[in-house]
Image (tube, grey):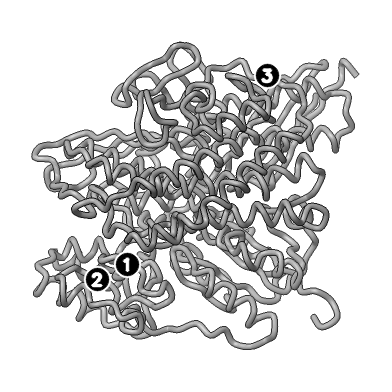
Amino acid sequence: MSDRKPKLAVWKFASCDGCQLSILDCEDELLALAGRVTIANFPEASSTAVRGPYDISLVEGSITTAEDRKRLAEVRQVSRLLVTIGACATAGGIQALRNFRDIQECIARVYARPDYIDTLATSTAIAEHVTVDFELRGCPVSKTQLLEVLSALLVGRKPAVATDSVCVECKRRGTVCVMVARGEPCLGPVTQAGCGALCPAYHRGCYGCFGPMETPNAASLAAWWRERLGATPAHVARALRTYNAGAEAFRTQADAEVARG
Amino acid sequence: MASRTRTIRIDGLTRVEGHGSVYVKVAGGRVVDAELRLFEAPRLFEALLAGRQFTEAPDITARICGICPVAYQMSACQAMEDACAVTIPEPLRELRRLLYCGEWIESHTLHIYLLHAPDFLGFADGITMARDHGEAVRRGLALKQVGNEIVTVLGGREIHPINVRVGGFYRVPTRAELAGLRERLPRARDAALETVRWVAGFEFPEAQLDCELVALRHPTEYPMNAGRLASTAGLDIPVAEIESRIEEEHLRYTNALHARLKERGAYLTGPLARYALNAERLSPMARAAAADAGLGAVCRNPYEAIVVRAVEVLHACEEAIRIIDAYEAPDRPAIAVPPPSHPAVGKGCTEAPRGMLYHRYDVGPDGLITAARIVPPTSQNQRVIEQDLRAAVERSLALPRADLERTCENVVRCYDPCISCATHFLRLELDET
């Protein structure tokens, strides 16, 4: 990796393209990045593809088809480091809501000919199928964090990505707590930092798009929502079942809420 | 040659959003089949929305597409406000237009500079193009950045903005925030004008689409988030009647539903259609730039859509300036929107960068969504793209295989298809027997 430019590849599975678009949204850094690495495979941005193996593969999206599961195994084989980007790749994404429903009924709601559709009953994170070297959270990922991960991996150090909660970012930013001061239900206390505590800065409760922090106390937060903010268990379950519905801490608490009725 | 059968298959179209392929079968010198196959894994949004709160639709549907999340938020809000029988005050609708201007600038500029211009100038991508056209690419990136900044100021972040809600916004921008944007807009407008001149100088293959062009039309505005649905063949209906006129069909080879106008067939939505139906309502500089670029009253050459996109970027810059200059902070960031008192149906239709985007929701008195239908621009355009592929291949049969494949990819890219949207990328297969 020393006397040649490292090769970067970008792969897409079930997703909205937003996380890989974050690379093209680095308007100030894009040309510099292209000077530092060979963008060897990035179909959304380029018609040329350089053969693997690749030094770093960025993987966007979740696994929802048998064919994608096979393709992912091939991607892993040609990648020295595999980094997942975004909530779909790290937790299954919004499409993991199917995991809690009958898949045939879901297909029938959208397509006139369900027999033409070939899909798995679940949407799952990349790490459930192959070894992942680093997981970058967010729906979408933060550009700053994405550049940090790439810069770190290129020089061979550990990326400096915080694993504490959105609450910490709110305090740092000086945002008044929306839950304490305004009674807004907020997932900030159990959600990993990274967005810069965006929603509370816009007077809105965090909706958990960076997924669970390292050691969240989701049960305590759920009780707070129910007992002090008057939320129903169904409301709490819905809030936990969005873009990171498949992440363990959110999933188990949502299940507990559903069981509560 | 005449008796030979050939297939052209392009597996994995590039510089488009999502996974798709092209399959063309030629027999006896004629194209027998031309299929755009969108094999993006289905994400089943309409099904996932059932049982969610009506207030969640803007954020959930934004996740259909990371390139045009604002469009989804706009159509979803409008549909929910329709279901709940509320109308947002004009200052909030203006702020929504400002947010939409940001997305038009960002999405169109991405397509013009990084995805489409490389076809005309003979490069594999925008980054390699920058070696010979550095000034242009840097101009494009700077322009795109201003679009993203508008979305960030109004929406909190450029992808999946967090500040849009049914009824308005969570927080409206401060004067100081808008002043920061306002300062950057004149340069963006100049860059947009330069962009129109730059792309107008490209060489365009001859081509004419004879299909019906469909877009929103508004008496005074270039359409974004208001108007009736109109066409070049005389269609003129309110948004409420769209479903009675457009039908969707599920074909075996594609995960996106094909839309067509009942009893009329294929139609095209997007920049060419918006321009054909609304050119006179473009901003003054955009109108003048369109005339200088030689666009005429109607442009039916799909290759020239890049010019129309550039004109629309210029319009969006001027429109953003107009909105900011006239801005007076609304009394409150959103109006209250209680769920409907009885089961209700709400419909919304706005102009996404790629064309009209229709949402319909059934909502119960408990505020829960019971049914959803989303008709994105790319699924509406699939038939026309296939017809155009067929015509392009028939014109180009004498070309060597590699050139023919390139022609097919170029055709598809003219339409800026968003496959993530339509199924919620492209492979070309050409089958010549």
The circle drawn on residue B326 is: none
Q: Which residue is mark 3?
A: B208
**Residue B209 in the image: above or below residue B152:** above
Q: Which residue is mark 2?
A: A186
The residue drawn where x is 22% and y is 41% is: B89
The residue drawn where x is 26% and y is 68% is: A205
The chain that hosts pointer 2 is A
The residue drawn where x is 68% and y is 19% is: B208
Q: Position of residue A143 (x, y in %)?
A: 53, 69
Crowd rating for badge 2 (residues with CA inside 10 Å; few <14, some 14–19, many 20+): many
Which dot, 2 or 1, sits closer to the camera?
1
Whether tag 2 and tag 1 are in contact, CB under 8 A, the answer is yes
Q: Position of residue B80 (x, y in %)?
A: 25, 41
The CA span between labels 3 and 2 is 54 Å
Q: Which residue is mark 1?
A: A199
* Label 2 residue SS: loop
* Label 1 residue SS: helix
The reply to the same-chain question for discs 3 and 2 is no
